[in-house]
Image (tube, helix red, strand yellow):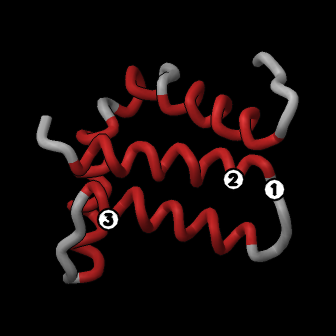
Amino acid sequence: MKKYKNIRSNVLMEALNLINGDREQVYGTPKENFNKIAELWSVYTDHKFTATDVCNMMVLLKMARLKNGAHIDSSVDAAGYAALAVEVSEPC
């Protein structure tokens, strides 16, 4: 990965690489994968979740981890989930 002069660019570029990487080949499209997770969460909790909810909840999970101190991986993941939330909320 190319290193940029500031951490914010490195975090965003790493998130960009992750959300555009090969995970889709393994897990399906983000919309498919997060819809599947939403279905399971909905059954488990008796509360209706959407794919967007899943992304937002994952951002919150990463924020909870960051309460224990800065950790680049959690920041990268939070940025990625935030970007994916916009994608899965759009009609495709």
Report the residue marked by disc 3: 53
Q: Is residue 13 left or right of residue 3?
A: left
Label placed on residue 20: none
Q: Residue furthest front?
A: 5
Q: How far apart are marks 1 and 3 (CA)?
A: 23 Å
Q: Is mark 3 on a helix, strand or loop?
A: helix
How many residues crowd mark 1 within 10 Å: few (<14), some (14–19), many (20+)? few
Q: Residue at x 36, y 61 (%)?
A: 54
Residue at the spot 31% in from the left edge and 30% down from the top edge = 28
Q: Nearer the viewer, residue 60 or 3?
A: 3
Q: Which mark is residue 75?
A: 2
Query: Residue 66: x, y in percent?
Result: 74, 68
User: Could you tell whether 8 is left or right of 89 in the image?
Assistant: right
Q: How crowded is mark 2: few (under 14 residues within 10 Å), some or many (20 or more)?
A: many
Distance Cα–Cα, label 3 vs label 2: 19 Å
| Label 3 with label 2: CB-CB less than 8 Å | no
Q: Mark 1 points at which residue?
A: 71
Quadrant assignment, res 33: top left
**What kind of residue is marked 3?**
Asp
Q: What residue type is labelled 1?
A: His
